[in-house]
């Protein structure tokens, strides 16, 4: 039995499909993931100007966006906190050696730069994008990701395990480097995720996973409108320069949304659609649901129209990197904004672990 | 700035900015015109008085303090005690006394709780709300904006640590009832309205028990 919300969503998705066929022959492929990118590479130079950036709704995304193959055929239902799986309360954390490792995983998750300094290159924390220590439904919860792997990912064009997915977070979202397989940090994070998923079905379509699907915007996402949304709803915490706010000790109370201390161009959050779905469901902190879908799309485009650290998959040129990894209207990489080509910052900077003295 | 302030500052061989603080010190310690000395209620070191709920001012952000004085002066923040005092201070006086308190070190020791028994009983509730929030109701943790340990993030998120429990309780209640303006983006009214009275008590007691360690 479909809820009214689900019916609305399905109807909306169908409508978008129809509109997409007519209006965005390229963009509609994004709705199914990025499978079609290979076929579209010749179209890279046709990418629209920033103000015309297309925008297509996506299925709910995983830790940083890329939907496992199971979601390529059918969007998951819109989820709500009431219907979502509930991870066990922290009062039920096991004792003993396994419990210690789970706790260590939680510590890494909520204070990543200090707890895993060898692999982190910015002051973001896992919990910056996965609220409530990875527990919160619709905030790409860790339990939802855990039950979704192994899965085929178009990003890597291979089947990834959960650990490999975590490695991607370190490399892209944390602008760091991937811990080696079975590094204590990964074992701890995997243990924490496993514990959070206690009792959950192995189901990549579990309600509450990823960020909730968002209907296509009525109007194409727009930089100027996004700037206004940002000034009214985001600037208080994230600052006019998008750099967030840090304590004197370097702890990022409010994470950097762009610039050298933010996630790099390879991160899922760098996709306009992923950012829009996250923002709509979770921002502003403490005032959820106050932005319209259109505002979320606009401000997501605005956020992702700023420079950030180079994509680690950089091929030697912006054009080549765009061609290989950003040939989608969902990414601003390689496009010109305010006279500058995004991503034209040269090769990735050598990894430098972030030094943090105290929270 | 008054001529007296300049002479006082120069006489001590201090730079101009220091003379501003000297003015602020004078207002804090001896008053200014109809305004009584701040220290009468806020303590000699701006540490506040826990039992009466007079807040600590020491090491709170200058911009934040100045905004509060402006809000008392124009009546948007209601307080029978503070409104006439803020109105008796010029805009320059308010800036100087704010800078003076911002430069004072945070109290080293936590203020004694007004209700230690209650604090003990509700400590887990208060600590959980402070550090983890209650996300089932989309209620963020206090420290997600007020910073680790509730030590504040200038200029919009004042320190909570080492603040009087009575003061914190009264402010959260004021946001719940609309007696205090909702603050930037209306955040505090939205957050406070998700708390029960017992939770307000618990979180106020929690931060009163956290040392206001100076993080500058």
Image (spheres, coloured by chain):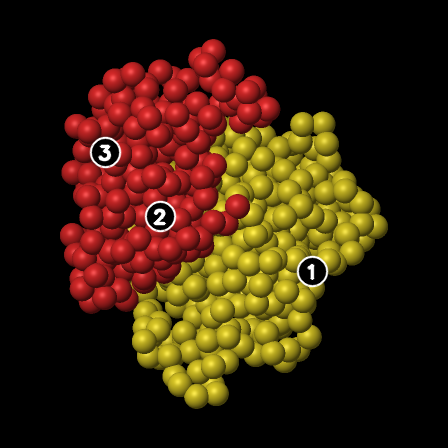
Binning the other alpha carbons within 10 Å of mark 2 as few (below 14), some (14 to 19) or many (20 upward) gives many
Helix, strand or loop for disc 3: loop
Binning the other alpha carbons within 10 Å of mark 1 as few (below 14), some (14 to 19) or many (20 upward) gives some
Q: Nearer the viewer, residue A347 or A215?
A: A347
Q: Residue furthest top?
A: B3
In the depicted structure, whether residue A64 falls above or below residue A342: below
Closer to us: mark 2 or mark 3?
2
Closer to us: mark 1 or mark 3?
3
Binning the other alpha carbons within 10 Å of mark 3 as few (below 14), some (14 to 19) or many (20 upward) gives many
Q: Which mark is residue B170?
A: none
Which residue sits at x=43%, y=70%?
A143
Pointer 3 indicates a residue of which chain? Answer: B
Looking at marks 2 and 3 on the same chain, the residue that comes earlier in the sequence is marked by 2
Is residue B31 something that shows in the picture? yes
Helix, strand or loop for disc 2: loop
Q: Colour of chain A?
A: yellow
Closer to us: mark 1 or mark 2?
2
* Residue picked out by circle 1: A353
Q: Is residue A187 left or right of residue B88?
A: right
Q: Are marks 2 and 3 on the same chain?
A: yes
Q: Nearer the viewer, residue A277 or A10?
A: A277
* Residue picked out by circle 3: B180
* Residue picked out by circle 2: B160
Task: Give x and y (percent) for residue A13.
Answer: 42, 49
Distance between the alpha carbons at the discs numbered 1 and 3 = 44 Å
Is residue A174 something that shows in the picture? no
Q: Residue furthest bottom?
A: A96
């Amino acid at each position: 039995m479909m809820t009214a919300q689900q019916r609305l969503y399905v109807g909306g998705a169908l409508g978008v499909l129809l509109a997409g066929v007519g209006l965005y022959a390229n963009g509609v492929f994004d709705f199914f993931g990025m499978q079609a990118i290979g076929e579209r590479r010749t179209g890279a130079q046709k990418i629209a100007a920033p103000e015309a950036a297309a925008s297509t709704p996506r299925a709910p995304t995983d830790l940083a966006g890329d939907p496992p193959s199971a979601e390529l055929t059918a969007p998951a239902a819109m989820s709500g906190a009431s219907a979502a799986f509930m991870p066990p309360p922290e009062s039920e954390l096991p004792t003993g050696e396994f419990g210690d490792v789970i706790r260590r995983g939680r510590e890494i998750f909520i204070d990543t730069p200090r707890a895993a300094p060898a692999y982190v290159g910015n002051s973001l924390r896992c919990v910056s994008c996965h609220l409530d220590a990875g527990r919160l439904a619709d905030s790409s919860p860790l339990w939802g990701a855990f039950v979704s792997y192994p899965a085929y990912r178009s990003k890597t064009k291979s089947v990834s395990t959960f650990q490999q997915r975590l490695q991607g977070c370190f490399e892209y979202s944390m602008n760091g480097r991937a811990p080696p397989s079975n590094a204590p940090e990964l074992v701890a994070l995997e243990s924490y995720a496993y514990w959070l998923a206690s009792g959950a079905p192995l189901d990549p379509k579990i309600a509450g996973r990823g960020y909730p699907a968002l209907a296509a915007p009525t109007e194409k996402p727009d930089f100027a409108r996004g700037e206004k949304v940002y000034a009214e709803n985001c600037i208080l915490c994230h600052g006019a320069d998008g750099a967030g706010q840090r304590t004197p000790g370097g702890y990022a109370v409010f994470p950097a949304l762009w610039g050298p201390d933010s996630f790099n161009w390879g991160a899922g959050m760098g996709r306009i659609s992923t950012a829009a779905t996250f923002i709509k469901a979770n921002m502003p902190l403490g005032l959820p649901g106050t932005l319209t879908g259109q505002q979320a799309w606009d401000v997501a485009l605005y956020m992702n129209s700023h420079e950030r650290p180079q994509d680690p998959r950089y091929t030697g040129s912006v054009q080549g990197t765009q061609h290989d990894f950003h040939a989608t209207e969902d990414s601003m990489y390689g496009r010109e904004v305010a006279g500058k080509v995004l991503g034209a910052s040269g090769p990735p900077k050598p990894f430098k672990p972030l030094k943090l003295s105290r929270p | 700035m008054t001529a007296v302030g300049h002479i006082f500052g120069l006489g001590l061989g201090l730079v101009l900015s220091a003379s501003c603080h000297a003015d602020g010190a004078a207002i804090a310690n001896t008053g200014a015109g109809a305004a009584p000395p701040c220290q009468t209620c806020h303590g000699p070191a701006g540490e506040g008085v826990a039992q009466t709920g007079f807040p600590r001012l020491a090491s709170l952000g200058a911009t934040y303090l100045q905004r509060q004085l402006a809000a008392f002066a124009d009546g948007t923040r209601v307080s029978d005690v503070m409104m006439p005092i803020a109105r008796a201070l010029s805009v320059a006086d308010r800036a100087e006394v704010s800078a003076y308190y911002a430069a004072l070190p945070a109290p080293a020791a936590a203020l004694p709780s007004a209700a230690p028994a209650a604090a003990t009983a509700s400590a887990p509730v208060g600590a959980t709300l402070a550090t983890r929030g209650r996300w089932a109701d989309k209620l963020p943790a206090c420290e997600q904006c007020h910073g680790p340990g509730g030590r504040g993030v200038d200029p919009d998120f004042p320190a909570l640590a080492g603040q009087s429990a009575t003061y914190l309780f009264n402010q959260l209640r004021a946001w719940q009832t609309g007696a205090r303006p909702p603050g930037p983006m209306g955040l505090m009214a939205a957050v406070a309205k998700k708390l029960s009275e017992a939770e307000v008590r618990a979180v106020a007691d929690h931060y009163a028990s956290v040392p206001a360690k100076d993080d500058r």
